Amino acid sequence: MDTIDVRFPTSRHRDGSDAMNPFPDYSAAYVVLRTSAGAEGHGFVFTVGRGTEIEVAAMRSLAGMVIGQPVEELLADPGALARRLIGDSQIRWLGPEKGVVHMAAGGIVNAVWDLAARRAGKPLWKLLADLTPEQLVAQIDFRYLRDALTEDDALGLLRAGAAGRAQREEHLLRHGYPAYTTTPGWLGYDDEKLARLCGEAVTAGYELIKLKVGGDLADDVRRMGIARQAVGPDIRIAVDANQIWGVPDAIEWMRQLSSFDPYWIEEPTSPDDILGHAAVRRALAPIKVATGEHVHNAVMFKQLLQAGAVDIVQIDACRVGGVNENLAILLLAAKFGVPVCPHAGGVGLCELVQHLAMFDYVAVSGSTEDRAIEYVDHLHEHFVDPVRIRAGRYLAPTAPGMSAQIVPESLAAFQFPDGPEWAATADEPVSTAA
Amino acid sequence: MDTIDVRFPTSRHRDGSDAMNPFPDYSAAYVVLRTSAGAEGHGFVFTVGRGTEIEVAAMRSLAGMVIGQPVEELLADPGALARRLIGDSQIRWLGPEKGVVHMAAGGIVNAVWDLAARRAGKPLWKLLADLTPEQLVAQIDFRYLRDALTEDDALGLLRAGAAGRAQREEHLLRHGYPAYTTTPGWLGYDDEKLARLCGEAVTAGYELIKLKVGGDLADDVRRMGIARQAVGPDIRIAVDANQIWGVPDAIEWMRQLSSFDPYWIEEPTSPDDILGHAAVRRALAPIKVATGEHVHNAVMFKQLLQAGAVDIVQIDACRVGGVNENLAILLLAAKFGVPVCPHAGGVGLCELVQHLAMFDYVAVSGSTEDRAIEYVDHLHEHFVDPVRIRAGRYLAPTAPGMSAQIVPESLAAFQFPDGPEWAATADEPVSTAA
């Protein structure tokens, strides 16, 4: 197992700037598993710069639970590894099931799935869709979920999802999966760039775009006006506050934007505030409430659904304990009948999470209605198997694996702090703390 | 700023064994702040063995925000530092406000308060109690709390708490603060040891003892019978499942123990499951529900209170973002009229948290009724200013500071992995993963 701290200096151009993350350097705590026969599995935890070294340290601390394990055993049951990594009785104290150690476990678990899919010669979405309901259910830890989702519930959902699967797979391969774009809406962009990018998004075929809000109310009113003008009345505009508000502020601020018909408000407040999201949703309906990129485990998603706190579940490939926990979250969302619109962007999040959304379509929810995967046009050139977008849709990946591999040249160039892209700028500060 | 990974090999005797933590090695990610004038502030994050190196790495990553700061400025407003540490726009991605990075921030913030109290020549509880309501409120981040606790609410509570403060302080100094003991109840102890320690606890003056449960139902029934027999009907017996159950299991298992009149069930399920705790509480009343040692921030405590999920708030000195966030949690508990019974034990948790409970008594809740600080008789000999227990009560510390300092000889002996206590046993495994 190798770990690499790789950082892209995105803060130099304020790509990715929002109310809570004014100067992110999109980064990854990257992991490569190598078998003695020379096969590889790649995975990573997405980060935004400082602190990536902590995530790498956590991965190294977990390495002893992976290194030396028989490969066939590992690949036959990644869920057993996930339980060991997440349940270690000492490391668990540092979570449990949250933050640095949980994401590190998820990164390793994802690398095992990447290896399993490569070995099987299938893209991950297809590998998952080809598992039986019983095999999928065995991959999930139900300990804290049974008051909302039992093994039997999950089996029932998956068996129901089998009907029409072949047609959906064919449809997916032919037409792809809907995307929405956040490219126009970063806070750091000026009005002219915002209007131009909104227009381009519509031309490119997107039916949903997203704007960052929460910096300054007058700015937000003006920017929403520009965007609505640029896209017309029929394109959905979601807005994203990135947790900047408390509950009362969220309600008040969003009421000032309601005349522009926002489709959803994303992360209106702390991602931990389940009851707060429920209050915001009640106050702002019919504006939808979305969250998930910082929702740290399936127990939290369970409660967001139980409390009626969300209209949109935004899974993230790198926040929770890997593919296994995301299977649980997809099934929870299906049980409650809430659509999943994955969080993506950053570096590599689009590449990873498309597999989970496509599996959801083929084998669980069976629908793409009111569903779309976030798309941001950043940093895809660094991937061996980058996402492919056509007419506002993700084309289904066909290469074996989870599309997680960064090209070796990029890993070398952007390795922090010694790669040439960083060493060359060592004298100038490349990012500023908020 | 110096950081030290210090671990005590408690797993060798199964002290501290519970259903989720069968073999803990009580440890600390320890931090010492030194001013250029030679003053020191000590703090730490309590851990249970493996992974302490990750917590130390996180503290080192945050060090740049503390080192070189003007000391007077830092001590005049530790809340400003807490906001910087917790709010760093890049490191925040790894939480936010949870897990490894949040606890690291809390350890550093606590060290600043230790330094401030030493500088003032007061124990921390007294330093805090002598601050004005306005000064205390300025130390709290209300961003995500205002739907339950506003600045005005907090001022009102603190102003009301001023009445009778002098008498309470005198009472505290004379009589101390109630303790309860977990010493008898570890899962690794046999029945004879359990009975003997229960009897000794009553003789020593404790009115509440705690037993670990959740390993095996028949064992729990037998152990509860032994304990109830040993302490008689008038001593309260709390039980602690350390998160081992899902919601339905918790309800069913506890019903089997209800004939022994358990006072509270602690951590019946995932610490993240607010709605789960509420369901358990509704099903098991009048058995009380307690949680907190793994509740990762004030937003979670806010919801536990809003949802009517807890009867007992168990603050922990090392889980959240330091003294400042614990001030918020004490005020939330007071606003909802729920008693605080701090979590302690481990290594040094008793030493730290007594200051917060005593401050709560003197300046916030004004009461010790139905309140007690957990006490476990482990590892106090390693502290410069260890807790003092008399007749089942904590005596108020009088030495300046937060009682956080470990004696230099212990730091050196138990430093991991190079201290002599560990290097000598390098060939034999000292702990086993669950």
Image (cartoon, coloured by chain):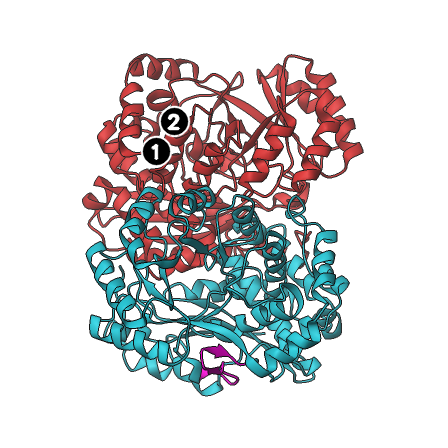
Chain colours: A cyan, B red
At horizontal 33% and vertical 75% (from top left) the residue drawn is A9
**Residue B231: which numbered mark, if any?**
none
- Of all chains, the one bearing label 1 is B
Q: Give the range drawn in magenta.
A: A382-395
Residue B149 — which label? 1
Q: Where is residue B60 in the image (x, y as percent from the top left)?
A: 38, 58
What kind of residue is marked 2?
Answer: Lys
Identify the residue shown where x is 55% and y is 50%: A96
Above or below residue A166? Residue B136 is: above
The residue under label 2 is: B335
Examine the rendering and report whether any part of residue B285 can be seen: yes
Looking at the rendered structure, whether the residues under marks 1 and 2 are on a common chain is answered as yes
Toward the viewer: B310 or A256?
A256
Q: Do the residues labelled 1 and 2 touch (CB within 8 Å)?
A: yes
Q: 10 Å neighbourhood of mark 1: few (<14), some, or many (≥20)?
A: some
Q: Which badge, 1 or 2, is on the more N-terminal residue? A: 1
Q: In this view, does B187 lie above or below A38?
A: above
Residue A300 lies, in percent from the top left, at 53, 49
Q: In which quarter of the image is residue B242?
A: top right
Q: Distance between the residues labelled 1 and 2?
A: 7 Å
Please give left or right for residue A220 compared with residue B27 in the image: left
